[in-house]
Image (cartoon, grey):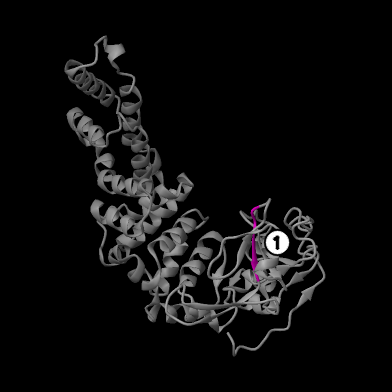
Amino acid sequence: MKNEPKKRLHRNPTPPSAQCLPEDSTHPDPFTEGLSCHLVGGAVRDALLGRPSAERDWVVLGATPEAMLERGFKQVGRAFPVFLHPETKEEYALARTENKTAPGHTGFEVRFSPDVTLEEDLQRRDLTINAMALDPRGNTLLDPWGGRRDLEKRLLRHVSPSFRDDPLRVLRVARFRATLNGFTVAGETSVLLTEMVGHGELACLSPERLFDETRKALGGENPAAFFTALEEWGALQALFPELAALKRRSPCRCHHRAATLWQHALQALDAACGLSRDPRLRLAALLHELEPEEARGLCRRLRAPNAYQEAAFLGCRFHKPVRRALALSPTGILRLLDAMDVWRQPERLNGVVQVCRADLLARRAEAASLPQLTFLEACLEQGRRLTGASLKLPPGPELGLALHQARRRLIARLRRGY
């Protein structure tokens, strides 16, 4: 970034829109009085889009760490000074520049000082839509890189050639494809992303970073776009080799809407988005064509929480027998429910049923109402009403056998209605 030309700061005196500005954009309080603070990043982008923003970040010009500490701010950044507001806990970062010194996401030399300008701070950011600022009164948009124009075009475009220095940006841009519905990646940015993948620095990303970006993408409006973007830039094989392998596997004829299992997995992910906003279900739907241990291994490699690992493993292991439930005998159905441990953890059946629905919806539109799914749900609902009290038996070995037999009779009776 040292050799890149400075951009003249464009000041637009017209506010983005009164209804889109973050609440309390003037931010008058004794802790920031006298500081040159600007609202930056995603909060400005979301304000212009009319979207709620989860958090607000500020950049502070002309200040020192000592001055921030004297005002009661708490320092949380080690590599560069980031401070938490004493009351709002919003992040205030001193303006800084960055220069690449080593491979990976953290291989940067950071320079912060009171003479770093707002233009220099915005220049180090990834995309033009994230390189805008609002002045302390919120009535002037500072936009040196054309971010507002790119927002109007719904375009994801990098700020400067130094974009290539941070491999995490491959994941971030893919995530924005998933969370900012309808946005496309500029051609020159897509070329740069492909080159970045080819340099091999994705291997330097931590599993926690990979999972965090994946989790955020799964919560977006179009999570499949995250994975198709990675595929387009050549990153799918490096980050999710289990999924990349699905491109080489042809589905059976019942997957008539897909040419490969990878396409079917993406269709199942799309279907899951219509069923739930739970990122665990969405991930399980995407992974359902993997072997159970493959799915578990992928989740463990990402260091995903246990709830994600369990949802993916159960979806892979049981979605096929659940789909064929009406072809099983009452004993076989009971064994299936026992294997899922649904009597103690009833939420497990719902998770597997939702994966099965997504799988079937990806094949044919009428699949969501297939009878085997409602049948198993009825078996669980009524089977859980069978207790020692209802059978008039005390705890002990006899109760376990009696519950087993009563559940089997119940399943046989319910089976006759389907």
The magenta segment is 89-94
Viewer-side residue, 305 vs 292: 305
Looking at the picture, does residue 97 appear above or below residue 227?
below
Per the picture, the main secondary structure of the magenta-coloured stretch is strand
Which of 329/181 is in front?
181
Query: Residue 81: where, in percent of width, then height?
Result: 60, 68
Q: Position of residue 241 (x, y in %)?
A: 30, 66
Towards the viewer: 65 or 400: 65
Residue 401 seen by the camera:
yes
Q: Vertical placement of 403 versus 178: above or below?
A: above
Placement of the C terminus among the 4 image quadrants: top left
- Rendered position, 311 above or below 393: below
* Mark 1 neighbour class, 10 Å CA radius: few under 14, some 14 to 19, many 20 or more: few
Whether residue 221 is in magenta: the answer is no
Q: Residue furthest top?
A: 392
x, y percent for residue 98? 56, 78
Q: Residue at x 36, y 25 (%)?
A: 381
List x then y, in percent, for residue 264: 34, 57
Q: Is residue 214 left or right of residue 4?
A: left
Secondary structure at badge 1 equals helix
Find out whether residue 91 is within the magenta segment.
yes
Please tell me which residue is depicted at 53% across the width and 64% down the height of the picture.
176
- What amino acid is labelled 1 in the image? Glu
Residue carrying label 1: 70
Residue at 30% across, 63% down: 260
Q: Is residue 341 left or right of residue 273?
A: left
**Is the N terminus in the top left, top right, bottom left or bottom right quadrant?**
bottom right
Answer left or right for 241 relative to 156: left
- Quadrant in the rendering for residue 103: bottom left
